[in-house]
Structure formats: structure tokens, C-alpha cells
Image: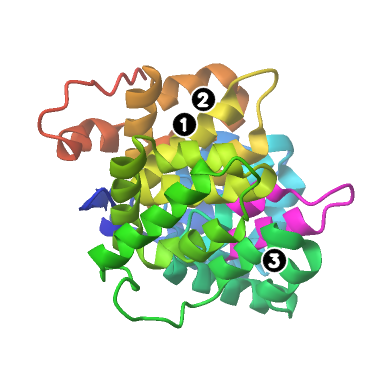
Amino acid sequence: MSVSWFGDNETVKEFPSVLPASHFDPHYDVRELRAAMRGFGTDEQALIDILCQRSNDQRQSIMEHYGRIVARPLIADLKSELSGNFKNVIIGLMFPTNHYCAKQLHKAMKGIVRIKEDVLVEILCSRFYEEIEKIAAAYQSLYGTTLIEDVRKGTSGTFRQLLIMTLQKMTDQSNGYGDWAYDPVKAKDQAKILYKAGERKIETDVNVFLDIFGFAVQRRRQVTIIFHEYEKISGKTIEHLMKSKVSGAVLNGLLTTVKTIRNRPAYFAERLKIAISGWGTDNDTLIRIILTRCEIDLTNIMYEYKRMYGKSLFDAVKEDTSGYYRRSLLTLLGIEPLVRLSSSFCSSCTVSCGITP
């Protein structure tokens, strides 16, 4: 458990849905995995029972021992045995989370048809700088080039400028800058600038928003004060202003930043709702969020999903997926952590978790 997101003047504990297995024995797991893939057919449930119920560090240990004992890479054997979305879940689990995010960014920028801007926004605009640094380091180790250079090549205009700002360390650490620093006077001044921008009938220069919110996740407390000051002046939310003055991928990036600062689990809950709703499931997004959040704050996300949509994420995934793919995702969601920790989110909460096995 950790404390790493800050919104509306309070810190919030993060609760994972996947915890390290107690009494972990990599040699035993290697034997069970080998037995599950030996001979005709594959014991998919055995793979789920092991790989979906171990921490990422434990899976790295399993891979290391498997390579020594079996003399073949575990990922290679898994790829030859599995297929479809179930394969994407299991293979994705085998990478350290930062490497998995780096691979998702590389895939989004190297698409044959077009760049997947929503993936870039989801990963880069929803992480804090310390997390971005680790993803960028993983990216360089995997591809031999810097993430910021590929972003420069793969994007353009104001959107590129916004993404580059998420990748750069803010150099101005004076009052109002840094995660916990704040300057109420500066916040009021910037709120007034935003208000004047909103009052203009002509098109507003997008740089006004980048100047104030480009490094927002690196000065979360200051930006939270700006939110409140703007609402005092205008009677409207900062999101309403952005939607009226900005559009496209830049708007998506700015709104993601705001949502991350206000309540990051709620942002991911919204993304999951979009992935599950409508015609056809966006399996790539569903898998990506569950895999990257299950050891960080997936239990928080499940709580927010239930609060926001009146239905448990467990039941939503259960209804929208099938087979071993469904079993793997439901195992990663985990039930007991939510039931056990639901009272920790809000002592006065009357919303039940709504989970049914």
C-alpha cells in the first residue's frame, strides 16, 4: 500500500488487488507451469492460478528459474501455447510494469495506420513524474532511443508540446512549484488569467492552458488551489472552461491531467467504463488498465467504478468477456481485497461493493 496521489487537499491510500503470494516457492511454480504446458493441450487454469496470483517481482523470479531449469524462455513457451486476449493478458503480466507501459507507448506510436493518441494520453498524462521517469528509462533500455525523441517524431503541434512537458522535469521550483509547494497569490492570479481567457468571444490561445497546466502533475497542490480559485471567480469548473476552448487530443490530455489530480482511480474507472460500454469491447484498454493498475490501485478503481456507475467492475467484466480470458481478468481484479478494505476508503460510505462471485 502506498500514498501517491493528491487531490482536493488530501492524500489517498492506494490499495492493489494483487498482492505477493505468501510462502512463495519459484521452483514449485516452475514445475507446475511446466506440467501445465507439457504434452497435448494446456492447463489454462493452472497458468491463471499461478501467474495471476503472484506479484510482478515474483513472476520475474519465476521466469529466471524457469529459464535455468527448463533451458527455454518462459515467455516463448507461453506464446506457443496460448492465443487471443487470454494470451495478451498472460504475456503482458510477464513484463515489469514499466516495461509493459513502454511497449504500449512504442506500439501506439509505431502504428501502421495512425498514432493512437488516446494511449499516449492515458499513460503519459495520468502518471506522476516519478512514474514517467521509470517508464522512460524502460523505453530507452528496450528500444535504444529516448521516449521524448520518439514523441517528438511521432506527434506534432500543441499535442506534442503537451506530451513533452509531461516527460520533462520542471526546473522552476520556486513557490507554487513542486508537489507540496503552493502560492495562494499566484494561484489567484492564474485563475484570473483563465477566467479572462474564458470570457473572450474569440478563440483562446491554447498556450494559456499549457503555461498553467503543462506541468500540473508536478505541482499538484498548487493546481488544486487554482481549480478552487477559478470556480470561485467563474462559478464553473475548470473542465467546463477547457471543453469550451480546447478540442481534440490536447483537450483529452488536459482533462486527463485534471482528472488525475482530482481523483486518479475515478479517471481509470471512467476509462474502463468506456472500454466496456458500447458496441464491442475495447479489449486492449481493458487489459492495459487492469494489468498496469492491479499492483497499485485497482481496488480503489473498483470502488470508484461502483460509486460512479452503480455496478461492480467485477460484474461488468464478467458480463463482457468469456472463457479463460474472463477468468484471468477476474482473478486479477480480486474479490477479497475489495471486501476487506472497502471500509478504509470512507468511514461514512453507504455504497456497498456489489461484488458477486
Residue 94 position in % (x across, y down):
57, 57
Q: Is residue 234 left or right of residue 80?
A: left
Determine if residue 294 is in view.
no
Q: CA distance from mark 1 to mark 3?
A: 29 Å
Q: Main secondary structure of the magenta part?
A: helix
Residues 137 and 45: in front is 137
Under tag 2, what secondary structure?
A: helix
| Marker disc for residue 72 | 3
Q: Secondary structure at mark 1?
A: helix
Q: Nearer the viewer, mark 1 or mark 2?
A: 2
Locate the N terminus by quadrant. Answer: bottom left
- Residue 277's place in the image compared with 179, above or below, is above
Instruction: Report how far apart the C-alphas of labels 1 and 2 lie in the structure.
Output: 7 Å
Sort mark 2 into few (<14), some (14-19) or many (20+) by Cα contacts within 10 Å.
Answer: many
Residue sitting at 63 percent across and 55 percent down?
205
Q: Position of residue 8 (x, y in %)?
A: 26, 48
- In the rendered image, residue 60, in percent from the top left (x then y), is placed at 51, 65
**SS state under label 3:** loop
The residue carrying mark 2 is: 317
Label 1 close to label 2 by CB (< 8 Å): yes
Taking depth in this image into account, of 300 and 333 the one nearest to the observer is 300
First of labels 2, 3 by sequence position: 3
- Please state the extent of the stretch shown in magenta in the rendering: 99-121
Q: Amino acid at mark 2?
A: Val
